[in-house]
Image (tube, rainbow, N blue to C red):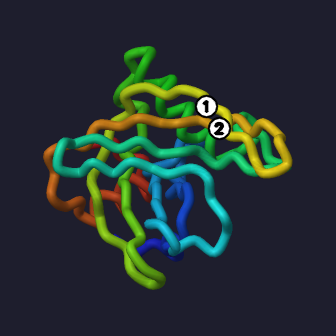
């Protein structure tokens, strides 16, 4: 199998691995910056409780980008909607990473969607900015073969 032509950026945020034969991403990647690592002021603090198998991840809302207008948020919300409607086979795998320092990422786990909610943050000017907070369970998997991700992307194989 040929390697994929591009990688996933390791900056904080939501990334997806496109599938050659589907609109649904082959996988979703969430990269959470530890305090002080982001180049932007970020009021949304993720919870990476790896030892208890739980992650809560704030969506991609920003001043000037509504939470429900974000293309990346819509991809994650779609995964939650598919899971909630019993279509688990259509839910892309979600891999969560933390970024403890610039240039370093640590794998936190392969996750499945549990539920999401919307919370509002008030910025310094008093503007209310709503955002998704996505909740995941971490599966008992220590490693994810890159070849499995490549196969999902190249052949839309959901084994």
As measured in the structure, the alpha-carbon distance from the residue carrying label 2 to the one carrying label 1 is 6 Å
- Which image quarter is the N terminus in? bottom left
Q: Establish if 39 lies above or below 113.
A: below
| Res 135 → quadrant | top left
- Is 112 left, or right, of 84 in this rendering? left
Q: Establish if 90 lies above or below 43.
A: above
| Res 107 → quadrant | bottom left
Give me the residue at 74% from left, 50% from top.
62
Q: Residues within 10 Å of mark 1 (few under 14, many from 20)?
A: few
Residue 2 visible within the image: no
Residue 77: x, y in percent? Answer: 56, 33
Element class at badge 2: strand
- Is 130 left, or right, of 53 in this rendering? right
Pick the front one: 2 or 47: 47
Give me the residue at 48% from left, 33% from top.
79
Q: Which mark is residue 55?
A: none
Give me the residue at 33% from left, 51% from top.
48
Residue 75 visible within the image: yes
In the image, farthest residue toward the top: 85
Check disc 1 and report the residue beneath it.
Answer: 119
Residue 23: x, y in percent? Answer: 59, 42
Pick the front one: 70 or 156: 70
- Is 59 left, or right, of 69 in this rendering? left
Q: Establish if 6 lies above or below 146.
A: below
Element class at badge 1: strand
Residue 17: x, y in percent? Answer: 50, 58
Q: Residues within 10 Å of mark 2 (few under 14, many from 20)?
A: many
Q: Which mark is residue 131?
A: 2
């Amino acid at each position: 199998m040929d390697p994929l032509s591009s990688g996933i950026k390791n900056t904080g945020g939501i990334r997806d691995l496109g599938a050659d034969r589907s609109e649904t991403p082959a996988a979703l990647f969430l990269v959470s910056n530890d305090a002080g690592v982001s180049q932007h002021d970020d009021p949304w603090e993720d919870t990476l409780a790896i030892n208890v198998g739980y992650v809560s991840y704030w969506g991609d809302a920003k001043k000037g980008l509504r939470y429900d207008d974000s293309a990346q948020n819509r991809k994650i919300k779609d995964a939650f909607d598919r899971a909630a409607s019993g279509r688990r086979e259509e839910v892309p795998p979600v891999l969560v990473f933390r970024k403890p320092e610039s240039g370093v990422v640590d794998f936190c786990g392969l996750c499945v969607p549990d539920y999401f909610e919307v919370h509002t943050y008030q910025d310094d000017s008093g503007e209310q900015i709503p955002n998704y907070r996505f909740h995941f369970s971490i599966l008992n998997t220590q490693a994810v073969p890159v070849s499995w991700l490549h196969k999902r992307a190249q052949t839309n194989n959901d084994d």
